[in-house]
Image (spheres, rainbow, N blue to C red):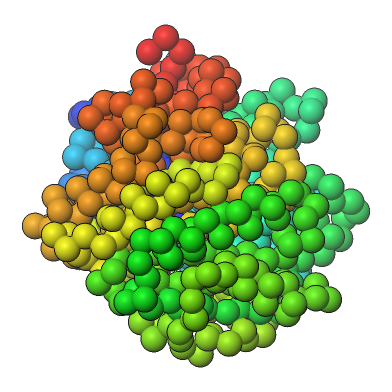
Amino acid sequence: MSGQQISRRRILASAPATALLAGLPGRAAAAEQPGATAGPGDTVVVRPDDSRYPALVVGNNTRWQARPDQVVLPTTTEQVAHAVQDAVRGGRRLTVRSGGHCYENFVYDDNTRVILDLSLLDQVDFDPAMRAFAVRPGAKLSQVYDTLLRHWSVTIPGGSCPSVGAGGHIMGGGYGLLSRLHGLTVDHLYAVEVVVVDQSGTVRTVVATREDNDPNRDLWWAHTGGGGGNFGIVTKYWMRSPNAVGSSPQSLLPRPPATVLVNMVGLDWASMDRATFTRLLRNFGRWHEANSEPDSPSRVVSSILALNHRNAGALGMLILVNSDAPDAGTRLAEFRAAILDGVGASIPATGRIGDIAASPELAQPRRLPWLQATRLLGVSTPPLIDPTLRGKHKAAYFRRALRDEQAGALYDQLTRTDVANPASGAVLFGYGGQVNAAGPDSTAAVQRDSVQKLLIQSFWSDPAADPANIGWVRDAYSGVFPDTGGVPVANELTDGCYINYPDVDLGDPTWNRSGVPWPTLYYGAHYPRLQQVKARWDPLDTFHHAQSIRLPGS
């Protein structure tokens, strides 16, 4: 999903001047030659006259581009630490990326002088000493799933976009089509290795675990939903489920279903009036209200309701059911019937439905191996894997079904003729289940009783179309929340926003008229605690961006 751009979530250091990487052992020669590399295993340094430079200074969302003095690509934790130390000493603004899927310009900022690109730091392996799986931040989700399954028959409940980097995805919470079964990604985070900067400006590397007696536990907790760009640079995640026992790798993380049933339900916009559209959203929301308890037998059902602009011709729903459940076929059929009740007959998805490409072959439920289904969905999401698009995104957690007037407001936006981009739309993700098994204080991800998540977004290519598309997203979002100042404040219906789908408009009173500050929308009552972690581990505010955790009192 994705991210952040869904490595949504980068890390920043401070302002101008002097040389970088002078202190990196064995790298002086490389530093003297633009774009040179000192040798195998050494840090790669790319400068503006290097042919690689244009590809490394633009985000997956091409609205965001930078002109840094250099892009540094480390391959070890030690190289990361050296690069950060030199940036701090030189007073250079440093930003960090793993996958590049950040929806806002937290990495590719105009003031960025150095980009620390972690894409070469991408190993996935098993660490017997930690009794956990070590995932480096540059590993793409597709690589993580492939490696964990092929070697150890396990997985993590992460997103479906293959090119999202693990770095940002995990620290923001992480969720996907297995989350109703197995919770958030961070529910399985055992430890983090983090490069931090202390009060004296000295860099050090810290390991923090979830063990109750770990003096660094607060740093681990902050990375279970606190988002990127706040405390330091994570160079390794160790993944192990909290209830895991023994030392066998196969028992330490969830096993994915052997097979899943996949079904894409298309609906013709031509037969969709306001009342029918409202009924569709009511059905979807109320089913999730009734079937999102942690122990619900229906947690084996995951779904995405994709609400394209009318110009796309169709809207629809992706359904995925764990085939290991003995009644999987029945559960899929019952879910599909409940959502389509009073809505009308489905059609094959011969055009794009939301982010998912035409998939008429899924008009009838199809049983696929889990990894194959994951790959199929990953490569069938053109907007998420197309690196040439621009985008704007806004999200909200829902504790209940959307009210009829909210559904009607979405209908009005999706049928507008003055802004008619077929790649504009809204997405409702089925949520709850095991996501809601964790207590609200057990992780920094505070939203633990929602049943669906809303994403309103638009994709386009032409920079000249920025105002129209950004304006459409803003209008659609504000229209859904007119009674709470244009944003989803925490109440009986909604519960704020997802930090991995960042939206700087939340800090602008033009678009957030609620009086509720953006940190509260993301973090709720956890924000003061996150500020205390910030004060301890990043007292100089070395790592910061437009929506990073602020130091207490600032």
Task: Name the quadrant of the C terminus.
Answer: top left
Left or right of residue 374: residue 155: right
- Quadrant for residue 50, please give it: bottom left
Left or right of residue 195: residue 551: left
Residue 327 in view = yes
Where residue 542 appears, as percent x and y from the top left, is 39, 26
Q: Is residue 491 above or below residue 135?
A: above
The residue located at (46%, 39%) in the rendering is: 497
The residue located at (48%, 35%) in the rendering is: 496
- Quadrant for residue 258, please give it: bottom right
Where residue 144 appears, as percent x and y from the top left, is 59, 64
Where residue 120 appears, as percent x and y from the top left, is 45, 59
The residue located at (74%, 44%) in the rendering is: 437
Q: Is residue 77 above or below residue 415?
A: above
Q: Which residue appears farthest toward the right when viewing the image?
A: 246
Q: Nearer the viewer, residue 275 or 81?
A: 275
Q: How many marks?
A: 0
Q: Nearer the viewer, residue 146 or 510?
A: 510
Q: Is residue 148 above or below residue 546?
A: below
The residue located at (53%, 70%) in the rendering is: 342
Q: Which residue appears farthest toward the top when viewing the image?
A: 553
Where residue 153 appears, as percent x and y from the top left, is 75, 70
